[in-house]
Amino acid sequence: MQSVANVSVLAMFFMYLLTAVFGYLTFFGNVEPEMLHTYSKVDPLDRLILCVRLAVLMAVTLTVPVVLFPDFSWVRHVSIAICLLFVVNLLVIFVPNIRDIFGVIGATSAPSLIFILPSIFYLRIVPREKEPLRSRPKIQAACFAALGFIFMVMSLGFIVADWVTTGRSSGGGH
């Protein structure tokens, strides 16, 4: 599974690299923050752009189950992939700006990966016989997890406040 995950991540890296290089070579300094919006100004076929968006989001989504589940089970992998694809399809249809999606994902995943998950893993992995819950390292780990949760809530609050002030909370505007 590690080899599959490595190949998958490497393939996604090259896909994004090619997208960035050819997007820049096509539009040079006129590339917008969302390159698909740049193409939609040139190409009147909005359905084609929607299909490209869907393909990119599906590619990103399909790498998640491969990387996250080294104890591989086809039933679990396929069911989680189908659920993720369903959510991604809803996001593609209802969210006009991918910046909002990346903002929410970044606000939730960064604190989880940096603060919350390592702290929780430490609390769960180190046995109570070796270190009781009231020991200094475990208290510090719990505080670290709480700090990460606070960062996540604050980041999501700033994103929602931005949506409310700019009128993008219900999928309107760019």
Image: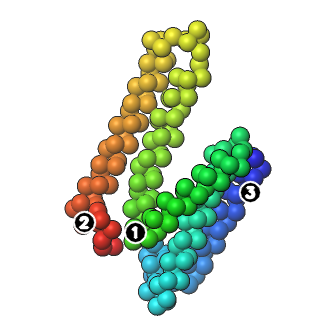
The residue singled out by tag 2 in the image is 166
SS label for mark 3: helix
- In the rendered image, residue 172, in percent from the top left (x then y), is placed at 30, 71
**Residue at the spot x=30%, y=73% of the render?**
173
The residue pinned by badge 1 equals: 94
Q: Position of residue 164 (x, y in %)?
A: 24, 60
- Label 3 or label 1, whichever comes before in sequence order: 3
Dot 1 alpha-carbon crowd within 10 angstroms: few under 14, some 14 to 19, many 20 or more: few
Three-letter amino acid code of the residue under disc 3: Val
Q: Is residue 24 visible?
A: no
Q: Secondary structure at mark 1?
A: helix
The answer to whether 62 appears left or right of 95 in the picture is: right
Mark 3 or mark 1, which is nearer to you?
1
Count neighbours of disc 2 (C-alpha within 10 A) and say few if under 14, some if 14 to 19, many if 20 or more: few
Which residue is the site of mark 3? 7
Check the image and report above or below for 51 versus 67: below
Q: Is residue 128 above or below residue 34?
A: above
Query: Where is residue 61, by image quadrant?
Result: bottom right
| Residue, far left | 165
In this view, the residue in front, 154 or 24, is: 154
State whether residue 31 is above or below residue 16. Answer: below
- Determine whether label 3 and label 2 are within 8 Å by CB: no
Q: Say what secondary structure mark 2 lies in.
A: helix
In the picture provided, is 129 more to the left or to the right than 172? right
Q: Nearer the viewer, mark 1 or mark 2?
A: 1
